Amino acid sequence: MNATNDHPEPARIESLVVQNYRALRNVTLSDITPLVVLLGPNGSGKSTVFDVFAFLSECFTDGLRKAWDRRGRFRELRSRDSEGPIVIEIKYRERRDAPLITYHLEIDEEGRGPVVKREFLRWKRGHPAAPFQFLTYQYGKGEVVTGEVPEPKDRRISKPLSGPDVLAVNTLGTLAENPRVIALRDFITGWHLSYLSADAARGNPEAGAQERLSPTGDNLPNVVQYLREQHPERLEEIFRTLRRRIPRIEKVEAEVLKDSRLLLLVKDAPFSTPVLSRFVSDGTLKLLAYLTVLYDPAPPKLIGIEEPENYLHPRLLPELAEECQQAAERAQLVVTTHSPFFINPLRSKEVRVLYRTPDGYTQTRLISEMPGVQEFIDQGATLGELWMEGHFDVGDPLAMGEA
């Protein structure tokens, strides 16, 4: 992938803490890399971690109540046999040399609706300095320290919110006097969580260029149209990669029909005329859709890809993993998978195994911390081979319970 230095350095999440969110009763992901891959058998909790990012993103774009309703409210969201609020905490840096910022969110339920029990932003500037909260709210009431570089001595301003189910960062992140809050709001609303469906990508949407692929990929023709009109060099880069991965593909076009719908056409190199997208293989469409996200001229702040192995030939998965590694120079990526082929080219510190303990809750372990694994890698073994041969001390899909 070319042109990796044409955008500002992206913000990065360095750790994630989740409590009381479905099977994630108490999970911490620390030392998160630009590309983090969640590996594990079915039911291990990979999709739940992925959904934490989706839930937080939807809280900012659609509001807490809608995100909470979509997931069955607390009856389905809170961990079984558990009490207390749902807690989501991320630690991130706006750039590599910036202070570490903590965003902490606690969600509880009162009456028939969700409430923000506690929400704060905290950072530490300089080695001797103590961390301090420059935004703190409970049930819609609290204070914020304004300014580009908020300090403990700065004046705190009380700004009540419109209700106890409103996120303070989402509201105050629209006000010019709160640049650090704005930065977090922009960061989270700029996430792209992908649930690609080949069937959705086969549709014929109304014509009109669109910059960003939808979560399901149903606007793929619109994105191709946008790239053709505004970024033809990036579209050609996507085509070159597609031809390298699937050699028979020559080009893809988005044609406007008389009724203003868009038709996606794919041309195989040996033939003179293209074919309709509905006759193209699922794998070809999904790979094209993934590439439009990974090669986005204005990449999302965070990209989530769930189970990319679905409908893709196993030999294409290591290639896609390498594309994800390169894209991670421009945006942070979170990928869930249970494919040994996808993880083969990855570094051990990029992959975490999720597993259920005997009490039914999810835990996670870095491959790089598993005894003996690095020695095998130093001798030329790949991660996928080691997993299939049983060298990981957790994550065996046939194990009934793990320590």
Image (cartoon, rainbow, N blue to C red):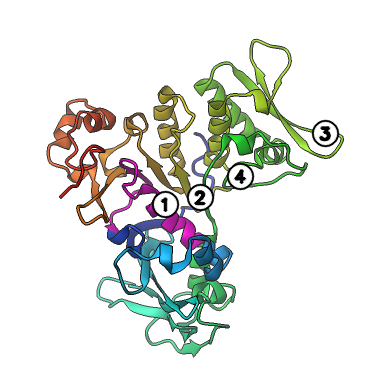
Task: Say whether residue 74 is left or right of residue 3.
Answer: left
Residue type at mark 2: give it: Leu
Whole-Å distance between the Cαs marked 3 and 4?
A: 21 Å
**SS at circle 4:** loop
| Mark 3 / mark 2, whichever is N-terminal | 2
Q: Look at the image and say whether residue 191 sits in the magenta stretch.
A: no
Label annotation for residue 257: 3
| Mark 1 / mark 3, whichever is N-terminal | 1
| Mark 2 / mark 1, whichever is N-terminal | 1
The span picked out in magenta is: 28-57
Whole-Å distance between the Cαs marked 2 and 4?
A: 10 Å
Residue type at mark 4: give it: Leu
* Residue designated by label 1: 50
| Mark 2 / mark 4, whichever is N-terminal | 2
Label annotation for residue 213: 4
Q: Look at the image and say whether residue 48 sits in the magenta stretch.
A: yes
Query: Could you tell me residue 74's position as x and y percent?
Result: 43, 68
| Mark 1 / mark 4, whichever is N-terminal | 1
Whole-Å distance between the Cαs marked 2 and 1?
A: 8 Å
Q: Are marks 1 and 4 in contact (CB under 8 Å)?
A: no
Whole-Å distance between the Cαs marked 1 and 3?
A: 37 Å
Q: Nearer the viewer, residue 286 or 298?
A: 286
**SS at circle 1:** helix
Query: Could you tell me residue 51's position as x and y percent?
Result: 44, 54
Whole-Å distance between the Cαs marked 3 and 2?
A: 30 Å
Q: Are marks 2 and 1 in contact (CB under 8 Å)?
A: yes
Q: Quadrant of residue 306?
A: top left
